[in-house]
Amino acid sequence: DLLFTEGRVDFQNVCFSYTAGKEILSEVSFTVMPGQTVALVGPSGSGKSTIIRLLFRFYDVQGGCILIDGQDIYKVKQNSLRSYIGVVPQDTVLFNDNIRENIRYGRISASDQEVEEAAVAADIHHKILSFPDGYDTEVGERGLKLSGGEKQRVAIARTILKSPRIILLDEATSALDSQTECNIQASLAKVCANHTTLVVAHRLSTIIKADQILVLHDGRIAEQGRSVVL
Ligand code: ATP
Ligand code: MG
């Protein structure tokens, strides 16, 4: 099992390819100190989401290693690793269950009231209430009419409920109106305080709040700094 103490993340010379021959990440090294927020920025295709996927162990690295609190994440049980990490992917796919359970999945012992509080915090509660069946609405194949950004807010509600020590957020590229964005960021900031956070950031407001910024270019860290010059 992963012996989680602080929530420090280290990438050490990580190399990765999805298919042989085409290297996607080359010698990527960085450290996220416990409780810090790191913003990953860079052009489309530069490898930002790949870094998130590797930390959640969707794939195996081909070179180097990824450590949490000094432990190689490939040497611990996957379940134990994932119990400490909450991930909000770029394109959220909801489970074939009702919306309440989709949120409760973050912490299955949560009460209905806690589920709704998380939905309020993620600014998706009113949208859910607009469906005739509210929280009992099934997310079937025929689908709930939710946009990409709204599905992502369901995933954020799930993560708020889980309150993991490490949060991986792959911001949707779709634009949110500024009020929604503001509300969500306030909610996430509440959950993220004292949590180590890696965020793939498209919004300047997210980047500005980060403790550290990593600029990726063609699978390499091109620049690394503590603040942006505007
Ligand atoms: P965006 O800002 O558009 O989300 P990104 O920086 O998140 O881009 P990644 O998704 O990490 O980019 O992809 C990095 C590279 O890996 C891209 O060239 C992409 O085509 C390739 N890639 C991503 N996923 C796969 C996959 N499942 N199989 C093969 N190649 C992939
Ligand atoms: Mg991406």
Image (tube, rainbow, N blue to C red):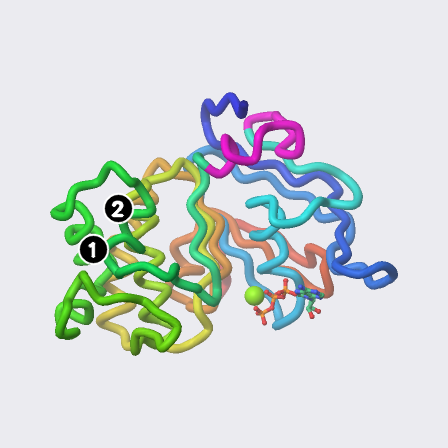
Q: Residue at x 34, y 48 (%)?
A: 159
Q: Is 149 displayed left or right of 48 in the figure?
A: left
Q: Earlier in the sequence, mark 1 or mark 2?
A: 1
Kind of residue indicated by mark 1: Ala
Q: Nearer the viewer, residue 206 or 134?
A: 134
Identify which residue, 37 or 144, lies in the foreground.
Answer: 144
* 210 drawn magenta: no
Residue 204 in the image: x percent, y percent? Answer: 42, 67
Q: In what quadrant of the picture does the N terminus appear? A: top right
Mark 1–mark 2 contact, CB under 8 Å? yes
Q: Secondary structure at mark 2?
A: helix
Q: Nearer the viewer, residue 109 or 70?
A: 109
Whether 19 is drawn above or below 101: the answer is below
- The residue indicated by pointer 2 is 190
Rendering coords of residue 153 (x, y %): 31, 63
Secondary structure at badge 1 equals helix
Image vertical order of residue 161 relative to residue 209, above or below:
above
* 14 sits to left or right of 93: right
**Region in magenta:** 69-82
Q: Quadrant of residue 95?
A: bottom left
Query: Could you tell me which residue is drawn at 45 percent across and 26 percent down?
Result: 6
Please check the rendered image and state whether residue 75 is part of the magenta-colored stretch, yes or no: yes
Residue 70, picture quadrant:
top right
Ligand 2 resides in the quarter of the picture at bottom right
Q: Nearer the viewer, residue 174 or 129?
A: 129
**Up/down of 213 relative to 123, above or below:** above
The structure residue drawn at horizontal position 61% and vertical position 49%, both measured from the top left corner, is 58
**Which residue carries the number 1 mark?**
121
User: What residue appears at the point 60 percent right and 28 percent down from the top-left corner?
Assistant: 76
At label 1, counting other C-alpha atoms closer than 10 Å, the crowd grade (few under 14, some 14-19, many 20 or more) is many
C-alpha separation, residue under disc 1 versus residue under disc 2: 9 Å
